[in-house]
Amino acid sequence: MNRRKFIAAAGAAAIIPRVSAANASEGKNEDDAVNPKLAVKIELHSATDDELLFLKQMGLHWVHMDFGDDAPYEVIRTTQELLGQYGLKIHSALLQTYRSLRIQLSQPGRDQDIEKYQTFIRDLGRVGVFSAGIDFHPGNTYTTQMIDSPRGYRVREFSVEDFRQKVEKQRFDRTYSADDMWANYTYFIKAVLPVAEKANVRLGLHPDDPPITPMNGVAKIFTHYEGYKRADEIAGHSPYWGLTFCVGTWSEGGTQMGKDVFGMIRDFGSRGKIFAVHFRNVSSPLPRFHETFPDDGYQDMYAVMKALRQVRCTASLIPDHYPGVVGDGNRRAADAYCISYMRALRQRAIAEVG
């Protein structure tokens, strides 16, 4: 298998031998209809044929696709077709346009950017993509330093003290209050959600990582359960608005989040409003944490998987922000480690819950 870049282009699908029509159209196994789905995130312009074959060999059927800054309909359509040759299908998609400062800080030109994102949502609906991920934290800092974990892998660390004393600075020409950010978010979601409803595409809102506010002169509004509750109300409790639930981010907040991980799953998951899950663990809650492999943090990830199964959640779950291991330049060993662990938890949860 060659290392040709997996770049969607009209006619490219003919290059790859086709699997049977039944397998290509199905893109899932029978358990996926009633259980959490296993997936990985891939980037359109970096995945290769070999890597897609690897995902097929790992038994995956779903991906989260990052389309970068631009995704014309033909790119989305052909990407879905190419993935189908490996028994894969896009379950959640990203287009970075929603992160435009013109949208998130209410700058001139935001309506043009919103229109581009609306077109993306319509196009996802045309090819049967279930959901799209969004977040809303333009002043964010994710990391204060990289460290070697106790197990010897290099990971992101965040310390509130280090951020406030060494890193934080005014990022934009003025500060943005919580009222400002709520107004900007509301404008965006009121413009995009009706399009998503008509396209049969769900919008999954990711929490602010790390869950502290403000950061760099900008308030963050999705650092607590109350923020999500308000966002649900703004969306009119639409079934097309819900969560990209990042277990890692919520675990970072610990007891300061209003509801813990399991409370969020019971609340939103039981109402069918968890569309995607970032199945991630961390060493401890704030004020300081580092990221870990899913089996190496403080959160009980089997209990998380079991809770998802108990509320009959059918979201797609991806390993997220996980470290690499020595000699693993393409991260396949780390991928296989996380996927295998998640599959084992999923199988046990299905067997236990029934």
Image: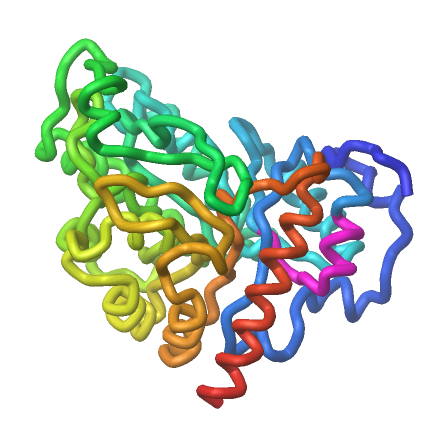
Left or right of 111 on screen, residue 82? right
Residue at the far bottom: name it: 354
Instruction: Please state the horizontal and vertical placement of residue 158, each as a whole percent of the image.
Output: 32, 34
Left or right of 249 on screen, residue 52? right
Residue at 90% x, 52% y: name it. Answer: 17
Instruction: Please state the horizontal and vertical placement of residue 229, each as a whole percent of the image.
Output: 17, 57
Q: Is residue 184 above or below residue 340?
A: above
Instruction: Please state the horizontal and vertical placement of residue 299, each as a whole percent of the image.
Output: 36, 61
Q: Which quarter of the picture shows residue 336?
A: bottom right
The quadrant the N terminus occupies is: top right
Left or right of 309 on screen, residue 18? right
In magenta stretch: residue 240: no
Residue at 26% x, 49% y: name it. Answer: 285
Q: Which quarter of the picture shows residue 344?
A: bottom right
**Can residue 193 be seen here?**
no
Q: Is residue 162 above or below residue 51?
A: above
Residue at 27% x, 33% y: name it. Answer: 159
Name the one closer to the observer, 110 or 316: 316
Range of magenta residues: 52-63
Left or right of 18 on screen, residue 326? left
Name the one closer to the observer, 254 or 95: 254
**Can residue 167 be seen here?**
yes
Q: Which quarter of the picture shows residue 255?
A: bottom left
Residue at 30% x, 46% y: name it. Answer: 207
Q: Is residue 309 above or below residue 173?
A: below
Number of dots carrying numbers? 0
In magenta stretch: residue 61: yes
